[in-house]
Image (tube, rainbow, N blue to C red):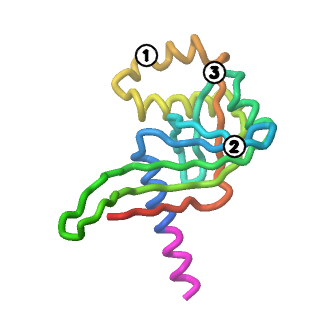
Amino acid sequence: MNEMRKSKRRKDAEWALEVFDRAPFTTLGMVRPDGTPYALPLSIIRSDESTFYFHCASEGEKIDCIKANPVVSLSAVSRCTPKYETEKNNFTEYYNSAIAIGKASFVEDRDEKILALRLLCQRFLPNFMDHFDDAITRSLDITTVVKITLTEPPVGKAKP
C-alpha cells in the first residue's frame, strides 16, 4: 500500500511539473521584509524535477524579499476554460493548476547563469537563439539569476 502511494505521488508530481512547463507564466509568492505577502507573475523555467530559474535586475522588491526570507511558493495555471453547462444550468471552469514550495538563492556560478538564461530564451524566444551569445556578452554581469530549489514535491489539481 505504501509503495502505491509513493508511486501515485511521483505521478502527481510529474503531472504538476508538466503544468508548470505549459503555463504561460508562473506566479512567485514571497514575503516582504515587513512580513506582508508579495506575489507576481514571472517567466520561470524548470531545468529538472526540483530546480526552477528566473532572471531580474540586481535590485528591487523581489531581491529584498528573497534576502529577507528565501522561502517562496510557485503557482501556475496551464489551462483555464470557463463554461456554462446547459444541461446542469451551472457555471463552471475547467483548469489545470500546480503549486510548489521552494527556497530561492542567487546564482553566482557563471556557467549556471548562462545555462538558466539559455533555457529561458529557448522556451520563450526560440527563434532568436542566434542572438543569445551576443546578449550574454553584453548583459551577463548585470543580470541577476535566481534559482528556486523545491523543498517538497509539487502538487497539481485539475477539473477536466
Give the alpha-carbon distance from disc 1 to disc 2, as whole Å: 37 Å
Write the residue at 47% across / 58% down: 16
Q: Indicate the secondary structure of the residue bearing disc 3.
A: loop
- Give the x, y percent position of residue 9: 53, 71
- Give the x, y percent position of residue 73: 63, 49
Mark 3 lies on residue: 143
Write the residue at 46% across / 68% down: 11
First reached walking from the N terminus: tag 1 or tag 2: 2
Mark 2 lies on residue: 37
Q: Nearer the viewer, mark 3 or mark 2?
A: 2
Three-letter amino acid code at the position of disc 2: Pro
Q: Nearer the viewer, mark 3 or mark 1?
A: 3
Q: Which of the two residues, 89 or 130, is positioned nearer the viewer here? A: 89
Residue 131 disc label: 1
Give the alpha-carbon distance from disc 3 to disc 2, as whole Å: 25 Å
First reached walking from the N terminus: tag 3 or tag 1: 1
- Give the x, y percent position of residue 152: 65, 60
Three-letter amino acid code at the position of disc 3: Thr
Apparent side of residue 29 relative to residue 76 in the rendered image (left or right): right
| Quadrant placement of the C terminus | bottom left
Three-letter amino acid code at the position of disc 1: His
Q: Indicate the secondary structure of the residue bearing disc 2.
A: strand
| Quadrant placement of the N terminus | bottom right
